[in-house]
Image (tube, rainbow, N blue to C red):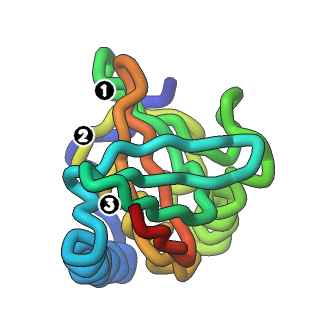
Amino acid sequence: MEILDKDYADPPELRHQIEKAMNGLAAVTAVHQGTFRIDKAAWSVNLDTGTIVFTTPQGMLAEAPVQIIGTYNTEDGSWLWGWDHPSVPPAVGEHARQMLHYGQEHDLARLTTLTFACTEQACWELTALAFLLCRANGAYCGPAGSARVFMTFGKITLTAA
C-alpha cells in the first residue's frame, strides 16, 4: 500500500470538482431520503446482476444498477479502488475505471494509485467525484465487516410494499 502524504493538497481544479461533487451528492441524497428513507433502509448488492436494493422499514423496494467505486478498510485506514479490486467484477467496476482514466489524463495520484492510506471523508470525496463525473443517480456507503463499500448507483425503480 502506498501512503500518500496526509497533507497532500489536491490541485485547485480537482478540489473545485470535489466540492461541486459533494454539494451535488448532498442534494440528491436529500431527495433519496425524502423518497425512500435511504438512511433507514436495509441494503443488499448482487454483484452478479450489478444491482443494489434498498428495503425500507415499510417494505418499499428501491432498486438500481450499482457500481463499486472502492472499499475502505477501517482497521488500517486504507482505500482500495474498485478498478482493480479482487472482489469487484469488471462490469461493476466501470465507474472506478472511469476515475482511473480521468486521473491518468489529469495526472492525479489519488485517482491512479490502487491503494493508499486516507480518511473515510476522503473516500466520500472520491465517491462523490465518481458520482459527478460518471453521472450517477446517487452514492452509498455500506458496511461489510471491517470494510466500508463505497458505491454509485443509477436510475432507481421503486416498488411499493
Q: Amino acid at mark 1?
A: Gly
Q: Amino acid at mark 3?
A: Glu
Q: Is residue 7 visible?
A: yes
Instruction: Give SS at disc 3.
Output: helix
Where is residue 65, by image quadrant?
Answer: bottom right
Report the residue at 28% width, 60% height from top: 38
Query: Residue 119 got which mark?
Result: 2
Q: Which residue is mark 1?
A: 77
Horizontal and vertical percent position of residue 145: 38, 19
Verify CB contact (< 8 Å) between mark 2 and mark 1: yes
Horizontal and vertical percent position of residue 98: 67, 66
Horizontal and vertical percent position of residue 4: 38, 39
Verify CB contact (< 8 Å) between mark 1 and mark 3: no
Residue 154 placement, left or right of 104: left
Quadrant containing the C terminus is bottom left
Q: Earlier in the sequence, mark 1 or mark 3?
A: 1
Where is residue 114, by image quadrant?
Answer: top right
Instruction: Give SS at disc 2.
Output: loop
Report the residue at 59% width, 58% height from top: 66
Q: Earlier in the sequence, mark 2 or mark 3?
A: 2
Cα separation between marks 1 and 3: 15 Å
Horizontal and vertical percent position of residue 27: 23, 82
Q: Which residue is mark 3?
A: 125
